[in-house]
Amino acid sequence: MNKPKSQVLEELRIAAVDEAKAVAFIEKQRWGNDACCPRCGDMDVYQMMTDGQRNKDYRWRCRGCKAMYTVRTGTVFEGSRIQLRHWCFGFWRASTSKKGVSARRKVGRYKLRRNRSDLLIRKYVVVRKSVGTQS
């Protein structure tokens, strides 16, 4: 008998395919349909565009405080150069495997460097603890 699949896990798997889908997934999870400025909380924000397309780093701008930011601002992703699609893949992989995924397996199987793999695991732990305390 097949277990029903979680909608979020399915979206996470799809988000791991490319960076644009990963950014869209993280934005949807963070803000839903109403994006807001992480600095001042203003809801009057817009996506920065170049020739009708999103910027390559997917920036937003607040009309209130005039600050530029991305979906990474104020999260565990801030300051990390690891692409969001790798984060999404790691979260999906850790969530769907019974025993989790070791740093050594990430290095060998997913072609990540050891220090990046360790960073991902440390941040997963931070996220899991923060999610656990909110519920």
Image (tube, rainbow, N blue to C red):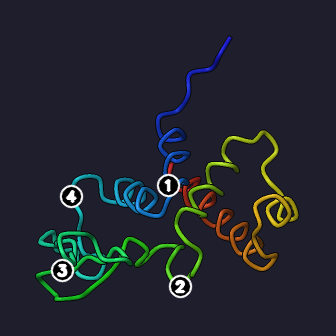
Residue 127: give x, y in percent of width and height: 59, 62
The vertical placement of 45 against 100, above or below, is: below
How many angstroms separate mark 1 from mark 3 (CA)? 28 Å
Which residue is identified by label 1?
134
Q: Which mark is residue 34?
A: 4
How many angstroms separate mark 2 from mark 3 (CA)? 20 Å
Callout 1 crowding tier (Cα within 10 Å): few <14, some 14–19, many ≥20:
few
**Identity, as a three-letter code, of the amino acid under mark 4:** Asp
- The reply to whether dot 2 and dot 3 touch (C-beta < 8 Å) is no
How many angstroms separate mark 4 from mark 2 (CA)? 24 Å
Q: Which mark is residue 79?
A: 2
Residue 36: give x, y in percent of width and height: 23, 69
Q: Mark 1, mark 3: which one is toward the viewer?
A: 3
Callout 2 crowding tier (Cα within 10 Å): few <14, some 14–19, many ≥20:
few
**Identity, as a three-letter code, of the amino acid under mark 3:** Cys
**Identity, as a three-letter code, of the amino acid under mark 1:** Gln
Q: Quadrant of the N terminus?
A: top right
Which residue corresponds to the image point at 21% horizontal and 71% vertical from the top-left?
47
Q: Earlier in the sequence, mark 1 or mark 3?
A: 3
Callout 4 crowding tier (Cα within 10 Å): few <14, some 14–19, many ≥20:
few
> Of helix, strand and loop, which one carries label 2?
loop
Q: Residue furthest front?
A: 51
Residue 64: give x, y in percent of width and height: 12, 83
Q: Mark 4, mark 1: which one is toward the viewer?
A: 4
Q: Mark 2, mark 1: which one is toward the viewer?
A: 2
Q: Earlier in the sequence, mark 4 or mark 1?
A: 4
**Direction from residue 101 to residue 46 in the image, left or right:** left
Residue 32: give x, y in percent of width and height: 29, 53
Q: Which mark is residue 62?
A: 3
> Of helix, strand and loop, which one carries label 4?
loop
